[in-house]
Image (tube, grey):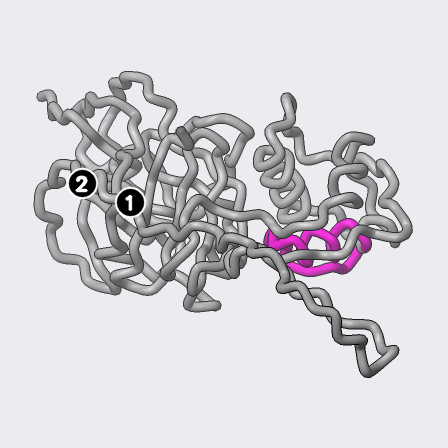
Amino acid sequence: MFGLVALVGCSTALTSGNGSEAAPATTAASTTTTTPPTTLAPTTTAAPTTTVAPTTTESTTTTSTLPASIVEVPVLESPLAAIGSSSGDEAARVQNRLIELGFWVQSADGDYGLTTRQAVMAFQKYMGFNEPDGKVDEQTATALSNMDLRPVARANSGTLVEIDKDKQVLFFVIDGKTEWVLNVSTGNGESYEENDQNTPGEIIRGVSLTPSGLHAVNRERPEGWWEGDLGEIYRPKYFVGGVAVHGSNSIPNYPASHGCVRVSVPAMDWVWDSGIMPLDTPVWVHDGA
């Protein structure tokens, strides 16, 4: 028996909370192409001319002309070393710098573990490096040290989740400012034919697409691992049909999923614990063009 679908994420079953009722059929992905509003940077005007002598010798404060969505950060006085993936004091400096820039790391403890590798990979993807491997080489160490602006999503107003399929990163935008960035792996765009994990004997066919457009978190499953139709997923937050942001043990530096948006398991726990992605949160998926 063959189940034919035009678009399938990591799971076509629809569940919510702790319920166990049968899932309704997957709905077609939204075709809405509306994008979150953006605002233009303010235009700098020339200062008025005056012939009056200043009445104080104190230095004046320079007012930034950057848009409110862009946040400056200081360049590191002591540049980071190219440590590869070694743990230690320098790894703690790398972790602190990543957190300062908004690339989520579980803790700055000097242990070069999973979330540090994922954060470095997200930084390398954001910068457009050719081989984002999650290791701090000379190029990465120099770029981290010399960054003077926090990363910015395309959306510069509102509160939403933005997924850039070109860069393969996810942005959390809060009140117009990009607060956090996660490494992700989205749909690879390829056709597939696989056994249904929940219905023995059935085969699922589809195309591994993460649908672009403006969606919203409409269902979620707070408990741990769940056997979806196409494999295990962790604490998913669905935003269109069977497509969700969920935890995974495999988040490579390229699109690899059936359509869902994979993040690391610790990152997914943080998403739930922080409450940063509640129901009805807008989710904007785009190709980066």
**What residue did someone put label 1 on?**
35
x then y, percent, for residue 258:
33, 29
Magenta extent:
93-110
Please name whichever residue, 55 or 165, is drawn nearer the observer in this view of the structure: 55
Left or right of 107 in this view: 78: right
Left or right of 195 in this view: 136: right
Residue 97 belongs to magenta span: yes
Please tell me whether mark 2 sits on a helix, a strand or a loop: loop
At a point 34% along the width and 62% down the height, the residue shown is: 222
**What residue did someone put label 2 on?**
32
At a point 25% along the width and 63% down the height, the residue shown is: 17
Please name whichever residue, 232 or 45, is drawn nearer the observer in this view of the structure: 45
x then y, percent, for residue 179:
53, 58
Left or right of 221 in this view: 3: left
At a point 44% along the width and 27% down the height, the residue shown is: 255
Residue 183 visible in the snapshot: yes
Please tell me whether mark 1 sits on a helix, a strand or a loop: loop
The numbered dot on residue 57 is none
Residue 33 belongs to magenta span: no
Q: Quadrant of the N terminus?
A: top left
Residue 128: image quadrant is top right
x then y, percent, for residue 216:
25, 53
Residue closest to the far right = 78
At a point 67% along the width and 63% down the height, the residue shown is: 49
Residue 266 visible in the snapshot: no
Q: What residue type is labelled 2?
A: Thr
Q: Which amino acid does label 1 sit on?
A: Thr
Count of numbered circles on the image: 2
